[in-house]
Image: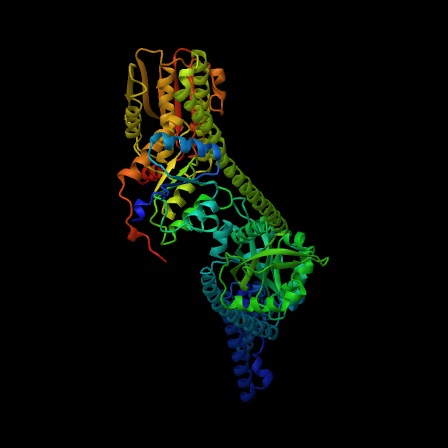
Amino acid sequence: MRFSAELLATGGFMPHGYCYLWNMPLVWLHVISDSLIALAYFAIPAILFWFVRKRRDLLFSWVFVVFGAFIVACGSTHLMEVWNLWHADYWLAGILKAITAAVSVPTAILLARVAPQALDVPGSAQWAKANARLEAEIRERRDVELDLRTSEAKYRDQAALLDLTHDAVFVRNMENQILYWNLAAERLYGWNQEEARGKVTHTLLQTIFPQVLSEMDSQLLASGSWEGELTHTRRDGSKIIVSSRWVLRRDVSGRPQAILESNRDITQRKQEEGKFRNLLEAAPDAIVIVNGSGRIELVNAQTEKLFGYSREEMIGQPVEMLIPPRFRGQHAGHRHGYYQSPRPRQSQMGAGLELYGLGKDGTEFPVEVSLSPLETEKGTLISSAIRDVSDRRRIEEEIRELNSELQQRLVQLGVVNEELESFSYSVSHDLCAPLRHIDGFARILKDEYGKNLSDEGKHYLDRVLKAANDMGRLVDDLLNLARIGRKEITRQKVQLADLVRQLISEMAEESEGREIEWRIEPLPEIECDPGLARQVLSNLLSNAAKFTRSRRPAVIEIGARQVDGAQAFFVRDNGVGFDAKYADKLFGVFQRLHRQDEFEGTGVGLATVRRIVRRHGGDVWAESEPGRGTTFSFTFGPQPHAVLARTQR
Amino acid sequence: MIDSDPDAVEILLVEDNPTDAELTLHALKKSKLANKIQLARDGEEALDFIFCRNSFANRRIDNGPRLILLDLKLPKVDGLQVLQAIKSDPRTQAIPIIVLTSSKEEQDLVRSYRLGVNSYIQKPVNFAEFQEVVRQLGMYWLIVNTKPPMSAFVRR
């Protein structure tokens, strides 16, 4: 209490104003200055306090606190100066200064320690510069962003457009990673955009390159694009061939940035091309495909073989190289003509003309050429199929020779035939004459001088007459047989049943006294020579009547049946029959299976039957067993009208 | 009347084969149909007789035979040529001609008829039949048939 009292006590000192001799302006100068300093010193910490409170992120905020305390302290000393102008509280002032010192010294120490750190904190100029840079950057970024946004929109539009195309389109970066993948690519390969993005194309698609990849890449870099065919494997594992086009995209500075790859599936076309090629190669003819300017576009292996040139030697050359020089001019003319109106020519080129090909070795050979136009992306091409007809010409020549030989033979045959005819004429005339004479004189002898002859003599005379008679019949039969061979067959519709009945009634006389049961089944109408059909039936019926002589009753059946699709007829009897092992002898001339004294006959009848049916294109055969009868069957060959009628129905 | 000419030849038989000729003559005689039969041994002789040439030059052409029996196969001039010559001449074409032959050839028949033959008879091998045929044809042509009138023979 004492101390404070002492503090407050003046202690006997004089106020500081005495020092200024109470010079009032001087006193007031101090008063005002110190007051203002104090005011400022009190205001500054308040502001600093506010600032620190507001700037939480402030570095070294405690410096501000210490600094504020120091300034407050300083301010209070100044206030004390004013007070002591009139009061002499120097102790209190001293104490205040001590406090101020206590605050300011640590503050100074602290500042000294903090200063180097604070140096690192940028100054405001640097801040300004950094700020400016930042702002520029921000602007730039905004621009870029805007750019990006517009170009993204553009790309979206482009991408949308690219989704419209049927070609698979994708963009890959220089590491071949897929950046973009259109809808067609998705459809073609099976992966969608999300699945494909970021994948390395050649790995994903297992690309098989037509050449070394590095070569393709260097071409792409050099020219900006590459085109060719690639083989890709789809998601499902199937392989496809694509027609591929790569375009390189560079950035502003010209650095390669990305590759746009556009692929079209040409698998089917390639397969068709392959088929076409196979077809071409498999063709039996040499095929030469020629373009509008007459140059060879394509040839097959047969062409190489036929002409002796290799493909390389022919392709691109005028087609006239395959033609002998003397025909080249006119060929070029014909070729132009053909281009004016290209139509497939079924008939051979230059029909009626002999065409020749020219081989590499200079040999000429006859050819046949057929032309057809071929519409291709390269325009109308002419495909010509060339066939070496040397062999055919040779064969034709041979046929011609054979034909002329045949002609000669025919002439010879004609001569022989004429000879035969004159032979049969003389047979009928000259051979019959002596027979008639024998018969004639024997009969005159018998009639007019018979009464002078003994019975034996008459008997011999009868034998002479009979022999002459037999021979006469034989000659007649033989002549008839010969005549059938020459006779023209004139087919008409014949009712065999009518013919059979007619023949039976004609036979009534010779079968007089015999018991014959004729069984006539319905017989279809047939087309044959009526006169000859009559001979056939007459021979077979009288044969049947003859060989059933011992039967009571004799049963003779006439019927029709189908044999191997042909209309056959049969005459069946219950006569003596014959041994089947002699069946082949049955139809030969003069072949007889029975003794003359059993059954008379010339042995020409069945030969005549066979000749007649064979001349009709038919045949005759017999089935028999001794003692059980015989069946003769025959056909009159193809029945053109009957067959026609059946098909029409 | 030429009709009543006792020398008139009733039948001209053209036959080269003497045996045939003998048999035919025998058959004709047996039938007692013809008294006067002239035999010609080949085609030329037949034509000489008909057209009154050479050894028959003193014959009159209008005194022709009533009937010609003609064989086809004849030396020199064959039967068909004889037939043609007679049938194509207006003076002789009215004479009935009967081909009597051993030929059955269709061609002979066709040509004979085309040339205007009046009858075609194929000689049967059997003499009895032949005799019968000869008797019938003589009966028919010389008795049954009305002979052509004189005006049928055009004079030259």
Of the pair A148 and A613, the residue shown nearer to us = A613
Query: In the figure, A19 relative to A98: above or below?
Result: below
| Residue at the image position 30 percent from the left and 25 percent from the top | A506
In this picture the colour scheme is rainbow
**Corner quadrant of residue A13:** bottom right
Query: In the figure, A614 relative to A224: above or below?
Result: above
| Residue at the image position 35 percent from the left and 17 percent from the top | A573
As drawn, the residue found furthest toward the front would be B6
Of the pair A476 and A331, the residue shown nearer to us = A476
Q: Is residue A485 left or right of residue A358?
A: left
Q: Is residue B127 left or right of residue A248?
A: left
Query: In the figure, B50 relative to B131: above or below?
Result: below
Of the pair A188 and B145, the residue shown nearer to us = B145
| Residue at the image position 40 percent from the left and 30 percent from the top | B26
Query: In the figure, A488 relative to A474: above or below?
Result: below
**Corner quadrant of residue A507:** top left
Q: Is residue A617 left or right of residue B146?
A: right
How many numbered markers are drawn?
A: 0
Q: Position of residue B31 (x, y in %)?
A: 34, 31
Q: Position of residue A625 (x, y in %)?
A: 42, 13
Of the pair A201 and A483, the residue shown nearer to us = A483
Q: Position of residue A2 (x, y in %)?
A: 54, 63
> Is residue A264 at least partly visible in the picture?
yes
> Is residue A176 at least partly visible in the picture?
no
Q: Is residue A79 left or right of residue A461?
A: right
Considering the image in quadrants, where does the C terminus of chain A appear? Answer: top left
Q: Position of residue A198 (x, y in %)?
A: 56, 53
